[in-house]
Image (tube, grey):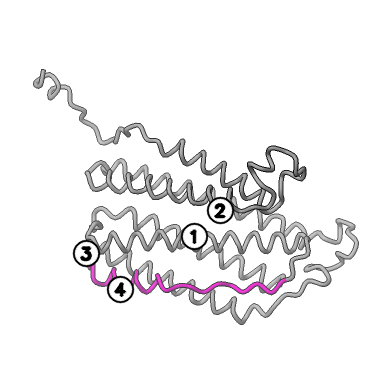
Amino acid sequence: MGTYMADHAVHHDYHILKPSPWPLIGSFFALVLAVGAVTYMKGLVNDPASPLNFVLGDGRPWVLAIGFIGVLYTMLGWWTDVVKESRAGDHTPVVQLHLRYGMILFIASEVMFFVAWFWIFFEMALFHDARLLEGWESWPPPNVETFDPFHIPLINTLILLLSGTTVTAAHHAIQTGDRKLAKWALLAYEYYTAVVEQTIHFKGNLYGASFFMATGFHGAHVIIGTLFLIVCFIRLQAGQFTPEKHFGFEAAAWYWHFVDVVWLFLFTFLYVVYG
């Protein structure tokens, strides 16, 4: 029997995944997060006597918090499994190639996400006079107080771009086997803490909505990118990256360069041209 199994062992470069609970768990908590976000920001139940009001609440953040914690838990568990698979040798060159394809498609989907916010912003910026909206003779609309883009936003832009160079330096150091330089370059990035101070008065108009959604979601991506590279730094300290196998860091670097490029567009158009 043992000889039979050995003769029929799998000989290919693909990784056959074991059944995983994370897709189901992640989907559930993503739904909880979405429902919690809507009920917290907008409120779904206006009838105090409704049973749903007791379950979801009206503007209460606890459903949102549970969903957020659940999504973080899913990320931690799922990505831990991926790292274990890599350490076990399951990420063959073919698997690594497919992981790269997957990361490229993920970043492409993120690009289209931001295209939606730019679309509504440019739609109103270029054609607001054709909408025949009262009080919208200009863009930004009247009574919207903007601020100097060449103050805090410019400083944040410079810090962001400089942090991108340290990520690139760390990536190059890993490829050449210089772990010491990689650690210092990646550590320099992790001190990025600048946050854009919003001074635009949000009054329920499209300018404020598109501005805060675009910059707010970019801020969320900065936090996610920071977590990616913190994990990469921990793995680098543990000696888990080699010149031949370091896709985890490479994916994090791609993600951060995407955040760089998106911010350049945000700074140019939302702050400078139409600010």
- Residue linked to disc 3: 177
Q: Specify the amino acid type for callout 2.
A: Val
How many angstroms separate mark 2 from mark 3 (CA)?
32 Å
- Residue 205 is situated, as x and y percent measured from the top left of the image, at 78, 61
How many angstroms separate mark 4 from mark 3 (CA)?
14 Å
- Residue 129 is situated, as x and y percent measured from the top left of the image, at 86, 61
How many angstroms separate mark 2 from mark 1 (CA)?
8 Å
Image mark for residue 184: 4
Q: Specify the amino acid type for callout 4.
A: Trp
Which sits earlier in the primary sequence, circle 3 or circle 1? Answer: 3
- Residue linked to disc 2: 111
**Label tally:** 4
Residue 7 is drawn in which quadrant? top left
Would residue 264 appear left or right of 116 to someone viewing this image?
Answer: left
How many angstroms separate mark 2 from mark 4 (CA)?
30 Å
Is 45 placed above or below 132 here? above
Pointers 2 and 1 in contact (CB under 8 A)?
yes
Of marks 2 and 4, the one in the foreground: 4
- Residue 119 is situated, as x and y percent measured from the top left of the image, at 69, 55
Q: Nearer the viewer, residue 7 or 23?
A: 23
Mark 1, Cα crowd under 10 Å, few <14 / some 14-19 / many 20+, is: some
Q: Is residue 178 magenta?
A: yes
- Residue linked to disc 1: 258
Would residue 213 appear left or right of 244 to someone viewing this image?
Answer: right
Mark 1, secondary structure of its residue: helix
Magenta stretch bounds = 177-200
In the rendered image, the quadrant that contains the C terminus is bottom right
Q: Residue at x 23, y 67 (%)?
A: 179
Q: Specify the amino acid type for callout 3.
A: Gly
Image mark for residue 85: none
